[in-house]
Image: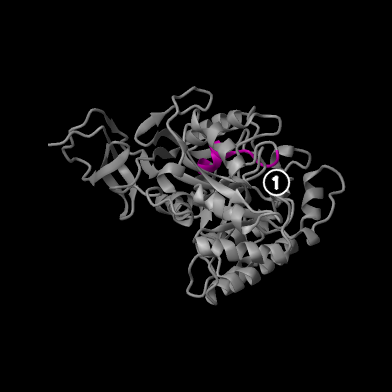
Amino acid sequence: MRQFDLVIRSRRAVTPTGVGPAAVAVLDGRIAAVADHSADLPCREETDLGEVALLPGMVDVDVAVQAPGQLLSQGYAHTTRAAAAGGVTTLVVAPAPASPAITSTDALRAHLHASASDCAVHVAFLGGVTPRSGPAELADLRANGVVGFACSLSDGGGADLPALDDIHLGKSMAEVATMGVPLVVHAEDAGELGTPVGPSNSALLAARPPRAERRGLERVLAAARSSGARVHIAPFVAAECAAILAAARAVGIPVSAQTSPHYLCLPAEHVPDSDPAYRCRPPLRSDANRGALWNALLRGSGPSGETVVGSVGSGHRPGTGIAAIRWSLPALWTAARRRGCGLAELSLWTAQRPAELVGLATKGAVEAGRDADLVAFDPDTHQVVPASDTSPYAGRRLQGRVLGTWVSGTAVPSEPDKDPSPRGGPLLAAYH
């Protein structure tokens, strides 16, 4: 009988067949078998989680890793440690804000170099699309392994990812459509944005109304209908636009959307007006919008009742937005459990659908043949986020705690300030 490297047993393992007792056997970084909880599985190391849940590692799409003034390598080291502590095992890095933005193969190589030696989780990349991007540049980025592309219709991508007009948007979509990968779009329309009157969160909210998202979404869908490109709206915030997404899907436009935990958990009415920890683009919206956004995620409004907003990503933007990747899973679980959701939905939103979106076929599920990217998550315990934390969850009581994370079958420290041996790194070689 063969000997496995690791066996993890849990009475609440989340697998494609549901949530229940199981034993997961790991060999050479992959899940070799998912067996009965009491199965005899010879191994070098065994962990019994008891009632603690075993989840597939989160696949976090559209993440920035670098804060202003921080070296790119430092950004990768810090962000991937925080990600692992929060149950994220794969980051899909946005092209901006970062230095340099991933708009050329030279910039991609810089990110590869910065992420190769000191990453606690796996890393994949989105190539940036700008008004200067031509077919050759996009083809080169795809040939060198990016798993998709990203663009903005306003300032959502930072200075290095300027807004696309309709001509460049249509041309870029036509190119991306031939490659079979998604185009991730920050869909606030620049023409509908005002200038905030002061630095407050309420001023930001007034300057970035929901109509900016609605107008941007209309532009994106018109271009997608002509090109056939797969488009993914990130982040999707203005819940009033869910009906527009549903109508587009009904006529065959391949559009999907993701939101972030802060939009599902933090209504604008309860945000300290002067606290920059709550500042993001698009801004946090009303409690009514929050409720409608949950409705779009849970019950959907598609032509056959399917979910329109299908996934949840951290939206991590250190230094330029909300930086809370470590708390995304418990924050989302705190709100989801109150709405009667279970661990299967949690994993669907944060692991399975994001992995499918960017074509990471060995990620996103606890299943034989997949990578052993796993998370021990206690859904019943509570924790208080330290008051010194720089995220908007500082001092808040959250339900659920990440107790352990495995990347390719190797455990990484649960605290982001520990110095793990690198376990992750770029995915280009495996997924090109």
Query: Can the viewer see residue 203?
Result: yes
Q: Specify the farthest residue to the front.
A: 136
Residue sitting at 74 percent across and 38 percent down? 276
- 100, 322: nearer the viewer: 100
Q: Quadrant of residue 309?
A: bottom right
- Magenta residues, as a range? 320-330
Residue sitting at 16 percent across and 36 percent down? 2
- Amino acid at dot 1: Cys
Q: Position of residue 365 (x, y in %)?
A: 37, 49
Q: Specify the farthest residue to the right.
A: 197
Pointer 1: what residue? 280
Q: Position of residue 15 (x, y in %)?
A: 33, 50
Could you tell me which quadrant the N terminus lies in?
top left
Residue sitting at 29 percent across and 42 percent down? 31
* Residue 233 on the magenta span: no
* Residue 323 on the magenta span: yes
Q: Specify the farthest residue to the bottom.
A: 251
